[in-house]
Image (cartoon, rainbow, N blue to C red):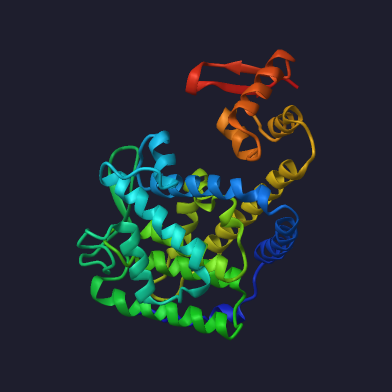
Amino acid sequence: MRNFNYSAIKDQKWDGDVLGYVAAIYKEAGKQELYLKQQPEKLNKLVEIAKIQSTEASNAIEGIVTTSTRLKQLALEKTTPKNRDEEEIAGYRDALKIIHENFDVIPITQNYILQLHKVMYGMNNPYAGRTKSVQNYIAATFPDGHTETLFTPLAPLETPEALNRICEEYNRAIGNHQVEPLVAIPVFIHDFLCIHPFNDGNGRMSRLLTTLLLYQSGFYVGKYISLETKIAQTKDLYYRALQASQVGWHEGADDATPFIKYLLGTILSAYKDFEDRFELVQAKISALEMVRRATKQKIGRFGKQDIMELCPSLSVSSIEGALRKLVEMQELRREGTGRATKYYRLN
């Protein structure tokens, strides 16, 4: 089995991209801390939106979906699941809630990871909270229909020890301040995905663990901006970075840099989104002007939901009224009807 020691990472010389991401994220995290002290009550709506988006996006990446109305009801605990997909969506919601409310008292150990998996995957599922019982493979299906195995994770018998090891080494590296947390976190997630410890739910667990580890190191952007949505929007880049980083992993000859850069870029992008939304929230302007500024942040076509995310302090009726007014003023053009309605700017 490969060695999970972080000593090589500790001594590694990182390129300008990685160092730039780390510096920029620390700067944005500092700004976010100031914002939260200024207008904490106005940002509560962002938390609700992020919760819904995170639950939807992380499951959708795995093909687990329901209607938008049902999704919102499930994410906000206003209904009970009707089928297996909805049970898994509700399970992700429950695991995410535990992390949001208890991140500071959740140790990074195999036992707690198994417990989170059990919450996420469903208490009544026989595989929930247990490491895999059969060999799994990471495969890709190509346009001509053929499938290729891209990576073979660890065998089931090796998995429990490996999961213990990555937890121990991560805790040692963070506890002894050996490795920058913003580097150690992507490396841990990369190793977790290479081990692929469960029969099912590995991707969703990796995203929950990303949020948990970031919170524990003082990076709270995932509470206000959905990291899962960011990953879903760049899914091809995510898989490409992961595949590039997996080469030579079994032999300890892998280079996790592509995955580190991808994840840090995603985190930084989320912080930038938070800043944009905070500027709109705290500005003392009319609903019309707030929506106007929000539309100027969009490129190409956008829907009402896109503006609602940027203007969480406004009611749906206020946003609809402002959009109608901007169409009348010929600043926007409207296309389609009902849920298919889209807008785009004319100047």
* Residue 70 position by quadrant: top left
Q: Which quadrant does the N terminus fall into?
A: bottom left
Q: Which quadrant does the C terminus fall into?
A: top right
Which residue is at the front of the view, 148 or 181? Answer: 181
Which residue is at the front of the view, 78 or 31? Answer: 78
Q: Is residue 183 above or below residue 21?
A: below
* Position in image of residue 125 (x %, y %): 22, 59
Report if residue 255 is visible in the image. Answer: no
Report if residue 259 is visible in the image. Answer: yes
Q: Residue 267 vs residue 193: left or right?
A: right
Q: How many marks?
A: 0
Which residue is at the front of the view, 158 or 78? Answer: 78
* Position in image of residue 181 (x %, y %): 59, 72
Residue extending farthest to the right is 284
* Position in image of residue 141 (x %, y %): 32, 45
* Residue 223 position by quadrant: bottom right
* Position in image of residue 299 (x %, y %): 66, 31
Q: Residue at x 71, y 49 (%)?
A: 275
Q: Residue at x 56, y 83 (%)?
A: 175
* Residue 38 position by quadrant: bottom right
Which residue is at the front of the view, 244 or 82? Answer: 82
Q: Is residue 297 above or below residue 49?
A: above
